[in-house]
Image: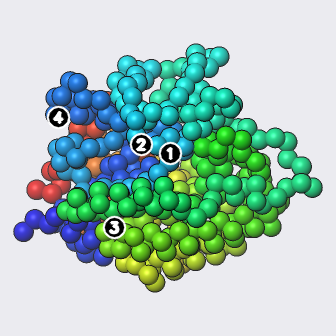
Amino acid sequence: MAMTSRERLQTTLNHQQPDRVAVDFGATPVTGIHVSVVHQLRQHLLGDKNWRVKVIEPYQMLGEVDDALRAALGIDVVGATPRKSLFATEAKDWKPFTGFDGTPCLVPGNFNITPAPDGGWHIYPEGDMSVPPSGHMPKGGYFFDSIIRQEPVDDAKLNPADNLEEFGPLGAEDLAYFRQKKQWFEDRRQFGGMLVVPGAAFGDIALVPAPFLKRPKGIRDIEEWYISTAIRRDYVRAVFEKQCEIALANIETLIGLFGDTVQAAMITGTDFGTQRGPFISCNDYCDLFMPFHKRVNELIHRKSRWKTFIHSCGSVYALIPDFIKAGFDILNPVQCSAAEMEAGRLKREFGKDVVFWGGGVDTQHTLPFGKPEEIYREVRQRIDIFNKDGGFVFDAIHNVQGPTPTENVLAMFNAIADSGK
């Protein structure tokens, strides 16, 4: 008998063979689809010419995969992100917007932009245009980049508290939001459930510049932060120590709230790999990051049945054993185009210990630039490799970017569907 989507995901997480490969597009900020692609898919499959897709993550301009589109595409997983986006917008008061490529969509009410000198757009934290902009999309672009707003670093005045401004106990509005999300999950109980845990991504470089804060303090420059992990390690460790204390308390609250409503939790999106190899040694990962990852994972595994999810781009082959020792159950995005990340090797060496969530098709080359038959072939090959004996959730390697051709995305979904026949 065919499994429900929830049963399919649970079987996969248990490293057992599901009836067909489990599929996720849209459950997390790193497994999504650009709004322009969602718009084209929806028009092709459902044909509602007046429908406007909601932009649920303005930083990357990710589109909402709604219930009707999820059913049409055969997607198995739904997810809940924190209350505020990377620009501190909230998913309410929707208003119409049109991208540079002409895509009509809906954006949150406090998504406010002004023209940038290069013809692009500036966007503002919490939509407050009385403070400097925190993001920039170049003319003709498809997503925003953070604007670095850091004052010159004075080591004599550095205070770890300045890099902790964004972390704190879940407030009344957060708890009300998550209670609504629990009901949202319950209304979709037939699907697999993923919760994006707030505040546990130690050193996530997308968060370091704090595009959600109006006037960020501390070390907020990307290069300066990476340097600090080497030359100011005590400072970084002090930030992580307090961040972890706050995160653990919030996670306990969320476990009590959601219980078994969800099956997996995204913990961190901190990248440890480049195209050619890790940019942190195994020893440095174990010294600076692993102690905090272990504390988070141990709490979750002790108090819930959730499986924990780490997102790290690039070549992380050498680090996977340490991710496993740190207690992670799921690895994403499985960047098979990077050095040492060959699909068969990863499955042979780590397939019994970690669930691969992603890796289904190359979004650097094949999906945006290949022919539909090439995409179909690569998808079928990856499913054959990764889905053997379970332990694989199909997703592309990171988000599907605009302007990926619709026929290529359809070829991917056709291959997924055919793999289950």
| Disc nearest the viewer among 1 and 4 | 1
Earlier sequence position, callout 3 versus callout 1? 1
Earlier sequence position, callout 3 versus callout 4? 4
Element class at badge 2: loop
Q: CA distance from mark 1 to mark 4?
A: 28 Å
| Disc nearest the viewer among 4 and 2 | 2
Q: Is residue 319 visible?
A: no
Element class at badge 3: loop
Q: Nearer the viewer, residue 29 or 274?
A: 29
Q: CA distance from mark 3 to mark 4?
A: 29 Å
Q: Which mark is residue 262?
A: 3
Q: Position of residue 369 (x, y in %)?
A: 38, 32
Q: Residue at x 42, y 65 (%)?
A: 265
Q: Position of residue 87 (x, y in %)?
A: 55, 40
Task: Rate crowding at label 4 as few (under 14), some (14 to 19) or many (20 or more) other CA atoms within 10 Å.
Answer: few
Q: In the rendered structure, are the residues bearing label 3 and label 2 in contact, judged by CB atoms less than 8 Å apart?
A: no
Q: Nearer the viewer, residue 8 or 321?
A: 8
Which amino acid does the dot numbered 1 rest on? Ser
Task: State the residue position of label 4.
Answer: 45
Task: State the residue position of label 2.
Answer: 91
Element class at badge 1: loop
| Disc nearest the viewer among 3 and 4 | 3
Q: Position of residue 154 (x, y in %)?
A: 89, 49
Q: CA distance from mark 3 to mark 1?
A: 21 Å
| Disc nearest the viewer among 2 and 1 | 2
Q: Nearer the viewer, residue 410 or 290?
A: 290
Left of 246 or right of it: where is 235? right
Task: State the residue position of label 1.
Answer: 85
Q: CA distance from mark 3 to mark 2?
A: 21 Å
Which amino acid does the dot numbered 4 rest on? Leu
Q: Is residue 140 visible?
A: yes
